[in-house]
C-alpha cells in the first residue's frame, strides 16, 4: 500500500511510514494512491460474512500484500471483536450503533486497529512510540483504552478544559501507566493545532518518535470504513436506496464512509450532519470553505471549527465541488432543536439517543421529506450514558450507565493543566 500527501502527490510513502509519521512534513494528509474496488461477488454474498470477515476483506483489499495475510487477520480479529448492529426504528429509519466497544464510542474501531497495527510495525525494532492526540470527547477515551499497557507505546492526550463530559474526562484521566492527560485551558481547535505543530517541531521529533491517533492518521480512517459495509449487510435485503447520516466533527467518519463508497459499497447518499459548528454544511451550500473558532455545544465531540479531514474529502473527489455535492448533503441544528429531537426520538420509539445521534436523525427526517423512497441510517457514535447531564435533563427516563463506564466514575482524575499555547506544551514535553 502506498500513500500520497494531499499537499504533494509526488510525496509517496508506504503504510508503515504513514502510520508512524501520521502527518507529512508538507502539512498535508496521507491518502491511498489507489482505491481498489471490491468484487461484485463480495457484495452478492456479503450476508454470509461475519463482521470480522468483512473487515478483513476490506483491509486486505486496501493494504494488499504489504502485511502478510495471517498477520493481518490476527490484527483484525483482535481489534474488531465487538458488534455494530443496525437498530431499525421503523421501515424508513434506523440507527447504526457504534458504541459497543470498550470505551463505548465509535472511535474504538480506529483506536484498537491502530494499536494493533503499530504494535505489528515496531515489535521487532525495540522502538518506543509516543502517541500524541487531541480529543473533543470520545477520541481520548478510545485511544486510552485501545493503547492501555501496549508495550513500547505511551499516549499523551490533550483535551479542552470544561468542554468534555464528566465521564468522558474520567475515561482519559484515570488509567495511568502509559496514559497521560494534558488539560488545556482552551478549545479542541487549540488542542488540535498544538498537536499538529508538535509533529513539525524538530526538537520534539528528535526527542520523541511521535505518532497521532487522531483521524489525521490513516490507520484511524481504514477501520472506520468497515462498519459501513457491516451496516449494508444488515439492510441489504430491504432492497431500497440508502442514505447514511453522519454526525461530524473532524469528518473522519464521513471520509471513511465515502472511502467505502469509492470501494464499491452501494450507499446512495450521505449527509454531513453537524451542530452550529457548521463549516462543512455551509461549504456544501455555498462552495466557500471558511473555518472559524469552534463554539461549545451539548454535542461536544462535534465542536470543531477547522475540521482536519476536509482536505481528504476534497481529495476523494479530485477537488470537484459538484461531484462531492452530488454524494453529500449538509445539515445542522442548534442545541435547542437537538434537545427537541432527542425527546421526539424517545417519544416515538422509546429509544434513548445521545445528542450527536439525534442530529443525525434530524438530518434523515429532513432529507426524507423530498426523498421518501430512501431508507435512512444515522450513526449513534457514542453511548448516551456518556452525556448523562444532557440526557437526564431532556428525557423522562434516566440513561442506564454500563458497568464499565460506572467503574471509572469514582476514580480520581489525574491531569496536567496547561495554557492553550504550543510553547508551554512543548516545554512540558521537553522537560519530561
Image (spheres, rainbow, N blue to C red):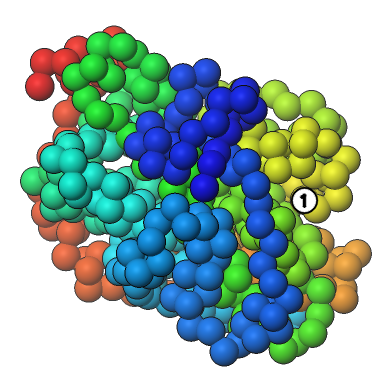
Q: Position of residue 103 (x, y in %)?
A: 31, 61
Q: Position of residue 72 (x, y in %)?
A: 38, 64
Residue appearing at x 66%, y 57% in the figure: 36
Residue appearing at x 19%, y 19% in the figure: 207
Residue appearing at x 77%, y 51% in the figure: 328
The residue to which callout 1 is attached is 328
Q: Evaluate whether residue 40 shows in this view.
A: yes
Badge 1: few (under 14), some or many (20 or more) residues near its Cα, within 10 Å? many
Comparing 25 with 70, the one in front is: 70
Q: Is residue 21 above or below residue 262?
A: above
Q: Is residue 322 above or below residue 356?
A: above
How many marks the image carries: the answer is 1
Comparing 358 with 201, the one in front is: 201
Q: Is residue 369 above or below residue 233?
A: above
Q: Secondary structure at mark 1?
A: strand
Residue extending furthest toward the right: 370
Comparing 61 with 87, the one in front is: 61
Q: Position of residue 71 (x, y in %)?
A: 33, 64
Q: Position of residue 216 (x, y in %)?
A: 48, 37
The quarter of the picture where residue 173 lies is top left
Residue appearing at x 76%, y 41% in the figure: 317
Image quadrant in which the C terminus is located: top left
Comparing 60 with 204, the one in front is: 60
* Residue 145 shown left or right of residue 215 in the figure: left
Q: Evaluate whether residue 275 shows in this view.
A: no
Q: Is residue 353 above or below residue 329?
A: below
Amino acid at each position: 500500500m502506498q500513500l500520497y500527501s494531499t499537499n504533494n502527490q509526488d510525496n509517496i510513502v508506504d503504510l508503515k511510514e504513514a502510520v508512524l509519521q501520521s502527518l507529512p512534513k508538507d502539512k498535508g494528509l496521507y491518502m491511498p494512491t489507489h482505491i481498489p474496488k471490491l468484487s461484485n461477488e463480495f457484495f452478492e454474498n456479503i450476508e454470509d460474512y461475519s463482521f470480522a470477515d468483512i473487515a478483513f476483506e476490506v483491509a486486505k483489499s486496501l493494504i494488499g500484500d504489504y502485511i502478510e495475510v495471517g498477520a493481518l487477520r490476527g490484527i483484525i480479529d483482535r481489534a474488531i471483536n465487538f458488534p455494530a448492529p443496525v437498530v431499525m426504528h421503523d421501515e424508513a429509519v434506523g440507527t447504526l450503533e457504534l458504541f459497543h466497544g470498550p470505551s463505548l464510542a465509535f472511535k474504538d474501531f480506529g483506536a484498537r486497529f491502530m494499536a494493533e497495527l503499530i504494535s505489528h510495525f515496531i515489535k521487532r525494532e525495540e522502538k518506543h512510540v509516543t502517541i500524541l492526540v487531541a480529543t473533543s470527547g470520545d477520541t481520548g477515551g478510545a485511544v486510552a483504552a485501545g493503547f492501555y499497557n501496549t508495550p513500547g507505546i505511551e499516549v499523551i492526550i490533550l483535551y479542552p478544559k470544561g468542554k468534555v463530559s464528566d465521564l468522558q474526562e474520567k475515561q482519559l484521566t484515570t488509567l495511568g501507566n502509559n496514559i497521560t492527560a494534558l488539560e488545556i485551558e482552551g478549545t479542541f481547535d487549540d488542542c488540535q493545532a498544538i498537536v499538529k505543530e508538535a509533529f513539525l517541531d524538530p526538537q520534539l521529533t528528535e526527542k520523541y518518535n511521535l505518532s497521532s491517533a487522531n483521524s489525521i492518521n490513516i490507520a484511524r480512517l481504514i477501520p472506520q470504513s468497515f462498519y459501513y459495509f457491516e451496516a449494508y449487510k444488515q439492510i441489504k435485503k430491504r432492497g431500497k436506496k440508502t442514505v447514511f447520516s453522519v454526525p461530524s466533527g473532524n469528518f473522519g467518519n464521513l471520509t471513511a464512509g465515502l472511502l467505502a463508497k469509492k470501494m464499491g459499497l452501494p450507499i446512495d447518499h450521505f449527509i454531513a450532519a453537524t451542530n452550529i459548528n457548521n463549516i462543512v454544511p455551509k461549504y456544501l451550500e455555498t462552495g466557500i470553505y471558511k473555518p472559524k473558532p469552534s463554539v461549545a455545544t451539548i454535542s461536544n465531540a462535534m465542536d470543531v471549527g477547522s475540521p482536519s479531514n476536509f482536505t481528504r474529502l476534497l481529495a476523494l473527489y479530485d477537488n470537484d465541488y459538484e461531484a462531492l455535492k452530488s454524494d453529500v448533503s449538509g445539515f445542522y441544528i442548534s442545541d435547542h432543536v437537538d434537545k427537541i429531537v432527542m425527546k421526539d426520538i424517545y417519544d416515538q420509539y422509546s429509544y434513548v439517543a445521545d445528542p450527536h445521534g439525534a442530529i443525525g436523525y434530524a438530518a434523515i427526517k429532513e432529507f426524507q421529506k423530498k426523498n421518501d423512497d430512501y431508507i435512512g441510517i444515522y450513526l449513534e457514535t457514542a453511548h448516551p450514558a456518556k452525556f448523562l447531564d444532557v440526557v437526564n435533563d431532556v428525557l423522562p427516563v434516566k440513561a442506564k450507565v454500563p458497568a464499565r463506564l460506572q467503574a471509572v466514575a469514582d476514580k480520581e482524575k489525574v491531569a496536567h493543566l496547561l495554557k492553550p499555547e504550543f510553547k508551554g506544551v512543548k516545554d512540558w514535553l521537553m522537560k519530561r
